[in-house]
Each structure stands twice: as structure tokens, then as C-alpha cells.
Image (cartoon, grey):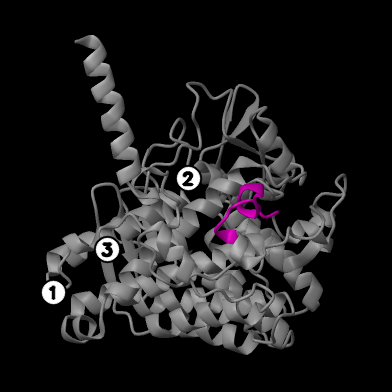
Amino acid sequence: MDFLRRQFFIFSFIFFVFSCSDEDYLPQHYLVSDLNLKEYSFSDEAEMNELRSIIFDELARNITSEHYLLIQNLPSLAVTAGSKNADEIALDQYNWSADNYSFQVVWEDMYKAISHLNSIIESLDYKSVKQYAFARQLYLEACYLRAFYYFELAVMYGNVPVLNEKINSKSDFENVNVVSVDNQDYLWETIFSDLNHALELKEGSVSASTTQYKVSGHWAVKALLGKVYLYRSSKGIADEWQLAFKQFNDIINSGKFILEKNYANLFEENLAVGVEAIVKTSYYLELTKKSDLGAVFVIPSNEFISMLGDVDSRKSAVLSYDQGKWYYKKYNPLISSTSNSLIYVSRLADVWLMQSECLNHISSQDRSRLTGINLVRERSGQSPLEKNTLTSTEFVELLQIEKEKEFVLEARSLFDYRRWGADFIQKQFPELTISEKHLLFPIPETVLQDEFFSKWNLKQNKGY
């Protein structure tokens, strides 16, 4: 009987394998959307809000993941590796390789999120978007999020493949529209197209079991659009300084946002209504994973400690001193009073400082370039700049220091460092050898070997 049972089992297994398609038993590619939209009715508001929660919760996870935070924060003057992990030290030392696991995870996370958004955008037909306000809200938010992901990928990896089609199975790969990555305009056209659609957004908050996400609709889109214009202008891709200034100035003049009076309050979980927040979420950050303060994720650099000095009131909110050592208090659940701090994708202080940078570039003689930087400096207890006597270069250098102090650990460093260039980075790290290759991460080796991404004939970024 045992023999017969074994023979029956073997026969059944062979029959199962040959009756299945590849899609039934092969591991699913991360570009295959695992959102089963057949379960949702686009005419049902509750179900559309559930979908909203899913995509915003995914964003919260992605922007607070260990790997995203590593590659956004570590290559900066303020932060240094706090562990002996070889990959973290390599990131901190600008010694990057295509097999670094963090580069791979972030790439996959963002493209997986884009795949989910593609499914939603393509499935929301014209009729449902036209007839139901909540369906339209989801559609426009999905456009905003897709633009956000593509812009993040562009800053990190350069001219990445654009995939805006729904993929529900591996067989869908065969019919994907492929536009060569050599066509650099296509990525930017995609980002601008999505953002121009999303400008019609109304304000809204998204609640889920793990995150509370606030998106200030139209203003959130303008904040991202301004960053795109600023990035392209700084990199010499286009001259869009005036366009960037307009987006930031519109947000400032909207009257919707004001600077939080106390910097420390920005990161307290009980700040239910953030007057400074344009886009925010709340999510547990494992910046500290060990049971004691001796082994933390990242630590402040000596340069950053000196930079804050004794006058800047942000020091007590950002740093903690214990047993002869400095630690980050900000986003550190072992030191901070909260374990679920607010995370900002965009807040007014950033908009003010970017507006100041735009004005400085457009006309350094314009005294109004001082307004934004002075508001941020005064909140931190520093003296305002009373005379508009700084040269354009000196003003940018002061702005760079201010952003380092204001946004430490908020995943802003990479965006700014990439814009300010290799010479700026070399000045911050004279002991390192910095070159143009450090203005992009290497494309992960797993991506270059991926059968699907081979459609784009991807080549490794120069220098890797």
C-alpha cells in the first residue's frame, strides 16, 4: 500500500506541474501587481478609501524603511554610520557598488509601488472618475504618488525605465511599451504629466491601521512640482528657476500653512494637526534597533555637533548627550519621548528655504531672498540676517548649513547633495575622493541581470 500511495503521489505531482502555467508556480516578479482590483467596486466610497489606505501605507513603509533611510541620510555631513556593518560603512564612505543590498531593495520597493499605482490608474475608467468624487480623488492621488516615485528614482539612479502599464501576470511583460532610456525627456514628461493631472487634487487625509497620512492636495503637488523644477535647474537640465519659485511662492501665499513655533513639537506624535505639514505620515522608525545606546543606526558627526553650537535651540531637540557621547534624539525611540514620530515628505520650512534659494539665483540683489532663511533661523534662536550683503555663493553656503541642521534625518540630504554637485560634496569630505559618479547610485546588479529590465538595454551608470 505504501508503494501505491507513493506512486499515486508522484503521478499527482507530475500532473499538477504539467497542468500549471509558469505563472502558477514560478516566483512572482515584483513588477507583477498583487492588488486584486476585481475585489473592489470603483463606485463604492468605502472600498476606494480602503485602496487609498493601501497605497499610502505602502508609501509610509517605503520612505521609512531601513534601506531607504540609509541611502538618503548616510552620505551627508551631519550623519555617520553608527555600526560596523560593511554596507553601511561603504555608503558612508562613498564607496558604492552595484551589489549593495540597500540599492536593490529600494529599487524593487519603488517599482513594486509603481506597479500597484499603474493598476489603479489604468483600472479607474473615465466613467467612474467622472461620476464619483472619491474615485477621482484616488486617481489623482495615484498620479501624484507615481510622480513621487519616479522622481525619487531619477534622483537616486538617473534616467530609469518608465513603466506606466498595468501588469497582472508575467505574460503581460511581452506586451509592455518600451521607450529607450536614452530618451531622457520621456521620464520627465511622465513626471510632469502625472503632476499636472494631480494639480486638481483636493485636500484629504488617509487613515489606516498603521499610518495616518495627510496630503494637502493641490499644495502637496505644487511642492513636489517645485522640487522637480529646482532639481532640473540646479542640474542644468533646464532653466526653470522662475517656475520653481512660483510653486513655492504659491504655497507660502496660500495662507494654509505656518511655521510651527517650537521645532521640537514637529516630531511629537500628539501633534494631530500639523500647521507646517504639507505632506506627512506617522510610522514607527527603527533607527535604533539595539537594546542600549551603544549600538545605534546612525550617529551625529563631530562637524554637525559643532555646526549646531550652543545658541541653536534645535540642538536639544535633535541631540542627546550620555556618558561622554552624543546620540541622535530625533527619531530615536530609545531617547525620544515618542516611539511614533511624525515623518514629513514636505513641510513649510523646506518650502521657505527652497524659495530663498530660487530668489538668490534669480536675483541676489533681491532682499526678499532673506525672508525664508530668516524665519527658519529665528525659530531656532539664531540672529536674522539684517543686511543683504552676502554674495550669491556665500548665501548658498549659509543655506546649505541651515538645511543640514533643519532637516537632519528627514531624507533631504541626497536631493540637495545631488543638486549642489561633486565639488560641494568634496568640500564636505576633503578626506574622500569624490567624483561625478557620486552624483548617482549604481544600478543594482540584480536589475542589470533581470530578464524583464533587459528590454530597456540598461547600462551601468558611469564609474561603476
Query: In the image, is 165 to the left or to the right of 245?
Result: left
Magenta region: which residues?
442-453
Q: Amino acid at mark 3?
A: Arg
Pick whichever of labels 1 and 3 is earlier in the sequence.
Answer: 1
Q: CA distance from mark 1 to mark 3?
A: 14 Å
- Reading the image, the residue beneath label 1 is 43
Q: Amino acid at mark 1?
A: Ser
- Name which quarter of the figure residue 306 lies in: top right
Pick whichever of labels 3 and 2 is earlier in the sequence.
Answer: 3
- Reading the image, the residue beneath label 2 is 65
Q: Residues within 10 Å of mark 2 (few under 14, many from 20)?
A: many
- Name which quarter of the figure residue 5 lies in: top left
For numbered disc 1, what is the local secondary structure? Answer: loop
Considering only vertical position in the picture, is 243 above or below 335?
below
Write the residue at 44% across / 67% down.
Answer: 259
Q: Residues within 10 Å of mark 3 (few under 14, many from 20)?
A: many
Say whether residue 255 is visible: no
- Reading the image, the residue beneath label 3 is 52
Say whether residue 12 is visible: yes
Q: Amino acid at mark 2?
A: Ser
Q: Is residue 27 magenta?
A: no
For numbered disc 3, what is the local secondary structure? Answer: helix
Location of residue 371 in the rendering, given as x and y in whole percent from the top left corner: 59, 77
Q: Nearer the viewer, residue 325 or 220?
A: 220
Write the residue at 61% across / 53% down.
Answer: 447
Query: Which mark, by number, is residue 220?
Result: none
Q: Nearer the viewer, mark 1 or mark 2?
A: 1
